[in-house]
Amino acid sequence: MIYTVSIRQHDSPVPVEIGQTILEATLTLGVPYPHGCRSGNCGSCKSRLFAGDVEMSPYSEYALSDDEKADGRISPSNGGTGKIASPPT
Ligand code: FES
């Protein structure tokens, strides 16, 4: 199964396969998504979810606090399925 993610800074939808993170999918396509550790520890990829849902694997509180998550932020390096996300501008 493949989900599609729309990213504000990229013209085309990004297909994300089951077991793949949003960050992995964008980098595979050559989308210059901000990132660092790729594992949910640094917070460099933190993004705002505008619509849809993202299922995230465990991540560091340093990378994404509960308050940030409650405010609609996600960690694309840990988001396995999603619909619409945008990296910070
Ligand atoms: S790249 Fe480090 S938390 Fe996403």
Image (cartoon, grey):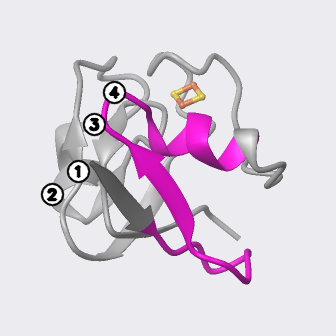
How would you rate the neighbour count of disc 3 (Cα within 10 Å): few for under 14, some for 14-19, many for 20 or more? some
CA–CA distance in space, label 4 to label 1: 21 Å
| Cα distance in 3D space between marks 4 and 2 | 24 Å
Q: Is residue 10 magenta?
A: yes
Residue displayed at 34% across by 17% down:
60
Between disc 4 and disc 1, the foreground one is 4
Q: Are marks 1 and 2 in contact (CB under 8 Å)?
A: yes
Question: Crowdedness of circle 2 by 10 Å Cα count: few (<14), some, many (20+)?
Answer: few
Say whether residue 40 is magenta.
no
In this figure, which residue is indicated by the disc labeled 1?
Answer: 69
Circles 4 and 1: CB atoms closer than 8 Å: no
Identify residue type, mark 1: Lys
Mark closer to the chain start, 4 or 2: 4
Q: Which residue is mark 2?
A: 70
**Mark 4: secondary structure:** loop
Who's the residue at 73% across and 75% down the image? 10
For the residue pair 76 and 89, the one nearer the viewer reads as: 76
Q: Which residue is mark 3?
A: 65
Q: CA distance from mark 4 to mark 3?
A: 23 Å
Q: Are marks 1 and 3 in contact (CB under 8 Å)?
A: yes
Between discs 4 and 1, the one toward the N terminus: 4
* Residue name at image x 24 percent, y 64 percent: 71
Nearest the viewer among 50 and 6 is: 6
Q: What range is drawn magenta here? A: 5-27
Residue type, label 2:
Ala
Q: CA distance from mark 1 to mark 3?
A: 6 Å
